Image (cartoon, grey):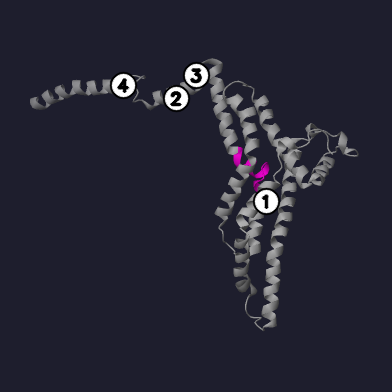
Amino acid sequence: MKLGLLILCCLIPATGTFGQSVVDNPLGDPSNPLVALDEASAALMGEGAEGRSRLLNILLMLTVLTLVPSVLLMCTCFTRVVIILGLLRQAIGTQGLPPGQVLTGLALFLSLYAMAPTLERVWSDGVQPFVSDEQPDYRVAWTNCERPMRDFMFAQIDATGGWSALYALLEHRGMDLTDPTIVAYDDVPTLTLVPAFMLSELRAAFIVGFKIALPFLVIDLVVSSILISMGMMMLPPVLVSLPFKLLLFVLVDGWTLLSVGILGQVADPLSSMIGGFG
């Protein structure tokens, strides 16, 4: 009994010491995750207007990154390029070759190559001044980024002759177009310009796709006629015409020819007419 009381008396001070070490863990201890979170928040927020500006820049950059895929599809020549490449694959008749990922990647980099001057203007006029706090107003930064993209879209609409789609959308909004020459480019809202641009890109892509499909259609017709005249009606013409179509495409260096042709169709926004509709 006395031995048990002696052991209990020895354990009581040790327990108090351990409890005190846990309770007295200082708030500033780096091992405390709450302190680490507090310090991270303070680093982001900073002090005063400078910290709020830094946090706002981060939020805006994250928002822009989420909108990049939509901008890529709607405001660049990516739509035209990927549709032309898809129609080429259908015309040759190779089914899943080249794979969709390959065509999408090729369309992406061709679009970036064609859009390089416009994207450089977007960066130098809008993004860089805003990030470096030369122009902290995000509304001005948005306008500076929007202007090069609008110039590009107007240039493509003018080059592809897609004014009819833009006129139809403007008339649907109630704008008087009895004399289109008095309507300035700045009078066209961006929300109207973007769908008009996409419609003009679809029109241009299908026109190019039709021109690409014609030679391969001729090969299919010739092969079908020969097979019918030979009485080989049970043999699918695609099996015979596919090697000839591939041979024709390789002999004319089709990939290079098509890529250069697509890039040549993209109009330079700096040389487009800025003013009223012509």
- Mark 3 vs mark 4, CA separation in Å: 30 Å
Segment colored magenta: 67-78
Q: Residue at x 64, y 62 (%)?
A: 90
Query: In this rendering, which labeled residue sits more in front, label 1 or label 4?
Result: 1
Residue 158: x and y in percent read 78, 42
How far apart marks 1 and 4 lie (CA) works out to: 74 Å
Whether residue 93 is visible here, answered yes or no, is: no
**66 with respect to 161 (left or right):** left
Of the numbered discs 3 and 2, the one sitting upstream in the chain is 2
Local packing at callout 2 (Cα closer than 10 Å; few below 14, some 14-19, many 20+) is few
Residue 72 part of the magenta-drawn span: yes
Q: Are marks 3 and 1 in contact (CB under 8 Å)?
A: no
Residue pointed to by mark 1: 261
The quadrant where residue 163 appears: top right
- At 71% from the left and 72% from the top, the residue drawn is 221
**Label 2 amino acid?**
Ala
Q: Report the disc number at residue 40.
A: 2
Horizontal relation, residue 237 to residue 185: left or right: left
Q: Viewer-proximal residue, 251 or 58?
A: 251
- Which amino acid is tagged 3? Gly
Q: Amino acid at mark 1?
A: Gly
Q: Are marks 4 and 2 in contact (CB under 8 Å)?
A: no
Marks 3, 1: nearer the viewer: 1
Chain-order first, disc 1 or disc 2: 2
* In the image: residue 156, left or right of residue 101: right
Badge 3 is on which residue? 46
Q: Residue at x 49, y 23 (%)?
A: 44
Cα gap from disc 4 to disc 2, whole angstroms: 24 Å
